[in-house]
């Protein structure tokens, strides 16, 4: 069993390094497609359920479960099928992948999840208006604004009880 070579300079023309770079490109592409698919299908199921009330929690859970199953079978042999920065950090902690690969995986996972979210936003628009999530977002923004105004001070003299009638 040959030991993998982890080059310092990826543009080195040594044949072993070129094989490693080609292998790394496959892994990164698999992570991008897998994370994109997971976020797009799972979050898409949540969006569809919030607008139509037809999927329920069981349908959303089945969607997540089936997409993860399909992705692991599709990309597990290529990249390890992490699709989540927490999983990638666990693999790095256990020394299953190198630090440079872990950082690349996390960067790709964040960028692909962002792309999937943007596409869902473009497809469905403001789906959260007049829902519980809309109220949650409004309250969250009020809390953030309050924190900015009070300069983040959490002293007892800044926080005063409010009577809600």
Image (tube, grey):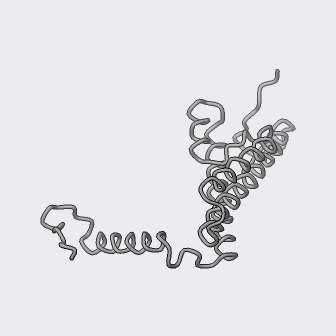
- The single residue placed furthest to the left in the displayed view is 157
- Rendered image quadrant of residue 91: top right
Q: Is residue 161 above or below residue 129?
A: above
Image quadrant for the C terminus? Answer: bottom left
The residue lying at 77 percent from left, 40 percent from top is 76
Question: What is the number of callouts on the image?
Answer: 0
Image quadrant for the N terminus? Answer: top right
The residue lying at 78 percent from left, 46 percent from top is 70
Which x, y percent locates residue 46?
62, 63
Which x, y percent locates residue 150?
24, 71
Which x, y percent locates residue 25?
79, 49
The residue lying at 63 percent from left, 78 percent from top is 125
Q: Is residue 7 above or below residue 48?
A: above
Asked whether, in this view, residue 73 is left or right of residue 40, the answer is: right
Front-most of residues 33 and 24: 33
- Rendered image quadrant of residue 126: bottom right
Q: Is residue 160 above or below residue 99?
A: below
Front-most of residues 56 and 41: 56
């Amino acid at each position: 069993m040959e030991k993998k070579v982890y080059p310092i300079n990826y543009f080195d023309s040594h044949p072993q390094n070129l094989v490693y770079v080609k292998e790394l490109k496959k892994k990164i592409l698999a992570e991008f497609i897998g994370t994109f698919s997971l976020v797009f299908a799972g979050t898409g199921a949540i969006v569809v359920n919030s607008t139509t009330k037809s999927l329920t929690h069981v349908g959303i859970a089945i969607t997540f479960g089936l997409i993860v199953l399909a992705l692991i079978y599709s990309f597990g042999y290529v990249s390890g099928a992490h699709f989540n920065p927490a999983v990638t950090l666990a693999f790095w902690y256990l020394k299953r992948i190198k630090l440079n690969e872990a950082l690349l995986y996390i960067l790709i996972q964040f960028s692909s999840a962002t792309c999937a979210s943007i596409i869902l936003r473009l497809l469905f628009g403001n789906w959260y208006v007049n829902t519980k999530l809309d109220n949650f977002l409004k309250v969250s923004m009020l809390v953030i604004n309050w924190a900015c105004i009070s300069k983040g001070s959490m002293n007892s003299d800044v926080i005063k009880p409010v009577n809600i009638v």
